[in-house]
């Protein structure tokens, strides 16, 4: 993301969103990438986790919790993440569900009324998509997700009223999938296919998306 893109995204993020915390899941060990932690992959000359945090900020998240797992100490040492709350997930090998639980638990003791959840390995999702999903926030009961050609993706916004049940069903790599499927009638889908690409950096072939 360039500075120009960040500046252009900021006005769209003006909304009553002070109660929303950005929650970045960045604990993955990159098993299919030869064991290279995804947070430390290089993008624009810096760790990918820095890019992901910058996207959340440019999209309108003024406070951000980052869940770390694989090589957490190295991420803390190499990545510049000022102003972020860094959350260690010692159970990161269990999958994304454990990171989501750790992140929501870290927010439970704050005054946050919702969490906007994004993934560190989706650099094709920029501040415009974050701002669109963030703009759906109304209350602790809010539930929304970005959609790409009608298919649900990230980022996802969970009002605090949903956190306990999401945490109870977040296992393995499923994250909140089970909960969202069960509460589809309450979920607002926000089409973002015109402003973002939801690819993941999972394999060596996917590294072509990094610069």
Image (cartoon, rainbow, N blue to C red):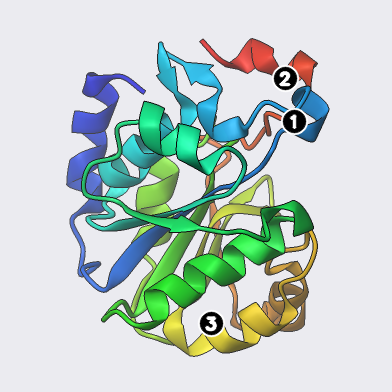
Residue appearing at x 44%, y 45% in the figure:
129
Residue appearing at x 41%, y 11% in the figure:
45
The picture places residue 100, in percent across and down from the top left corner, at: 59, 65
**Distance between the alpha carbons at the discs numbered 2 and 1:** 6 Å
N-terminal label among 1 and 3: 3
Q: Nearer the viewer, residue 89 or 24?
A: 89
**Distance between the alpha carbons at the discs numbered 1 and 3:** 27 Å
**Distance between the alpha carbons at the discs numbered 3 and 2:** 32 Å
| Residue bearing mark 1 | 202
The answer to whether the residues at label 2 and label 1 have Cβ atoms under 8 Å apart is yes
Q: Residue furthest front?
A: 73
Q: How many marks?
A: 3
Q: Vertically, is 150 above or below 177?
A: above
The image quadrant of residue 17 is bottom left
Q: Nearer the viewer, residue 102 or 53?
A: 102
N-terminal label among 3 and 2: 3
The image quadrant of residue 120 is top right
Query: Judging from the image, what secondary structure is the residue with disc 3 in?
Result: helix
The picture places residue 153, in percent across and down from the top left corner, at: 64, 52
| Residue bearing mark 2 | 206
Residue appearing at x 67%, y 65% in the figure:
98
Examine the rendering and report whether any part of residue 185 can be seen: yes
Q: Quadrant of the N terminus?
A: top left
Q: Vertically, is 89 above or below 121?
A: below
| Residue bearing mark 3 | 163
Query: Judging from the image, what secondary structure is the residue with disc 2 in?
Result: helix
Residue appearing at x 49%, y 66% in the figure:
103
Rate crowding at label 3 as few (under 14), some (14 to 19) or many (20 or more) other CA atoms within 10 Å.
Answer: many
Query: Judging from the image, what secondary structure is the residue with disc 1 in?
Result: loop
């Amino acid at each position: 993301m360039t500075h120009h893109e960040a500046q252009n995204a900021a006005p769209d993020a003006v909304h009553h969103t002070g109660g929303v915390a950005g929650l970045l899941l960045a604990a993955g060990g990159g098993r299919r990438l030869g064991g290279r932690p995804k947070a430390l992959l290089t993008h624009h000359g810096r760790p990918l986790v820095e890019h992901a945090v910058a996207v959340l900020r440019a999209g309108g998240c003024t406070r951000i919790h980052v869940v770390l797992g694989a090589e957490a100490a190295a991420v803390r040492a190499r990545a510049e993440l000022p102003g972020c709350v860094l959350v260690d997930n010692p159970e990161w090998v269990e999958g994304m569900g454990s990171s989501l639980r750790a992140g929501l638990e870290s927010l439970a003791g704050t005054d946050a009324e919702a969490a906007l959840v994004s993934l560190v390995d989706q650099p094709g999702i920029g501040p415009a998509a974050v701002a669109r999903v963030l703009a759906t926030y109304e209350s602790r009961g809010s539930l929304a997700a970005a959609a790409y050609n009608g298919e649900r993706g990230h980022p996802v916004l969970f009002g605090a009223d949903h956190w306990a049940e999401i945490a109870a069903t977040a296992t393995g790599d499923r994250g909140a999938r089970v909960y969202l499927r069960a509460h589809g009638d309450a979920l607002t889908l926000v089409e973002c296919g015109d402003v973002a690409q939801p690819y993941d950096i999972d394999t060596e072939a996917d590294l072509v998306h990094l610069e």
